[in-house]
Amino acid sequence: EAFNAAVSSARQLNAFLVETPDHALAAADAADTARAAGETLKPLAGVPIGMKDLFCTKGVASTAASHILEGFTPQYESTVSQRLWDAGAGMLGKLNMDQFAMGSSNETSAFGNVISPWRRNDGGNAPLAPGGSSGGSSAAVSARLCPAATGTDTGGSIRQPAAFTGISGIKPTYGRCSRWGVIAFASSLDQAGPMARDVRDCAIMLEAMSGFDPKDATSLDVPVPRWEQGLNASLAGKRVGIPREYRVDNMPEEIEALWQRGIEWVKDAGAEVVEVSLPHTKYALPAYYIIAPAEASSNLARYDGVRYGKRDLPDGANLQAMYAATRAAGFGEEVKRRILIGTYVLSAGFYDAYFTQASKVRTLIAQDFDKAWESCEILLTPTAPSAAFGLGEKSDDPLAMYLNDVFTVPSSLAGLPAMSVPGGLDKHGLPLGLQVIGKALDEQGVLNAALALE
Ligand code: GLN
């Protein structure tokens, strides 16, 4: 009875879109068998993992939380999920998310929002957003429904939900994790990564998920370091940069206090703290919200009612009408908004003014980081400009929602590894996250700085 009650209250979070207990049990059985036979256990032997529904999983519905993929069952496994199974893990289920990973609150899911397991301590019992787009992942790990989950991060979708729910999450260097079999949003930005309770678990997960994959043309052909073995919370001899421009207007006091705490913690761990400048920071959000929709509009052209999932074929419809009916009914409002923006900024008359310009800004932002690395090895910032907001609070104001990505988007545009770790609670008892950004391929440096903050 108690078990059933726990399961039903867990289900109220709406974190899982599909439950796959048999998959998880098979991994647990395999681990038991190996243990009984005295074999060396695989790194994730028997660990039940939640998979964001953006990963294609063979024989298990994969929808990107969109009606347009309803009825689509992949015939193949994404490289990242396959690597996790090869490392001994099993899948507990597919996790809810913002539709096509577009959003910061998980409210754009076609299958209902996810509810954060957290509540404010001031008596207000209003449900809170778990962050997004990996909101099912953050809620599930935070509520201890699974010890770890996969996420994807295009402009902050691993880090911001991790921050909102008091867990850890790392977006590795672009190209570390294969995008093969990950439903595409913005291909030049999309990266998979782990979300887990602490830094060590993230390191173990990331090690299993990473590695060169010839099936992804942007996959990096570099060795995967033993990150877990290399964990070290001392920052002696390291310089931690504090980017001046992240001190944005109207930054809430508690975010400022969080940042100060983080600065003290890295000092305690032996680091020297230096101020650095990332002068093009203020252009990152506008550039991101041109580049990401542009790539999305192209990537999502494939959902035409012919190849995947949903097809709406009105009576007497021709092909064109079938496309229109399918896409009108299949895509959610935010997805349509992005497709329209993307199509606009790529159109012949506006391409140079918007897309080319945004691409140039992106280069400048990447150069800002290169310059910063002349005076430090790691950057420390808040993960998000606020704690978790209430469900519905920003859902009809897309711009307010986009502004929540202000601290996560620059490192995405530059392809750099970045991680969020819990940095304490705000005055309402809600978790806040600190973000560590590192040089390309220096996940070890990022994980170690995160460990120092833990
Ligand atoms: N919130 C951002 C967006 O809506 C980032 C999403 C993501 O990283 N997938 O585009």
Image (spheres, grey):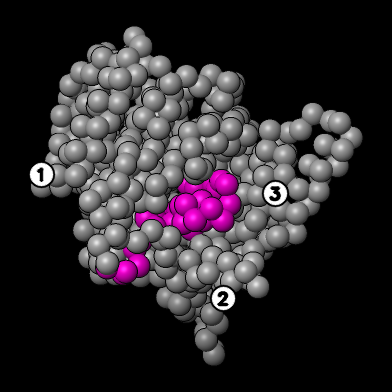
In the image, the segment drawn in magenta is 124-152
Q: Quadrant of residue 119?
A: bottom left
CA distance for labels 2 and 3: 32 Å
Identify residue type, mark 3: Gly
Mark closest to the chain's N terminus, 2 or 1 = 1
For the residue marked with disc 2, what is the amino acid?
Arg
- Amino acid carrying label 1: it is Asp
| Quadrant in the picture for residue 375 | top left
| Residue situated furthest top in the rendering | 237
**Residue 328 painted magenta:** no
Cα separation, mark 2 vs mark 1, equals: 47 Å
- Label 1 crowd (10 A; few <14 / some 14-19 / many >=20): few
For the residue pair 403 and 190, the one nearer the viewer reads as 403
Determine which of the numbered discs, if any, sits on residue 249 in the image: 1
Identified at 58% across, 52% down, the residue is 146
Label 3 element class: strand
Q: Is residue 349 above or below residue 334?
A: above
Q: Which residue is mark 2?
A: 311
The residue that disc 3 covers is: 90
**Residue 229 location (% of width, % of height):** 58, 20
- Is residue 62 in view? yes
> Going by the picture, which residue comes out furthest to the right?
37
Q: Residue at x 47, y 22 (%)?
A: 444
From the image, state whether disc 2 or disc 1 is nearer to you.
Answer: 1
Q: Which callout, 3 or 1, points at the residue further toward the start of the chain?
A: 3
Label 1 C-beta lies within 8 Å of the nearest ligand 1 atom? no
Name the quadrant containing residue 365. top left
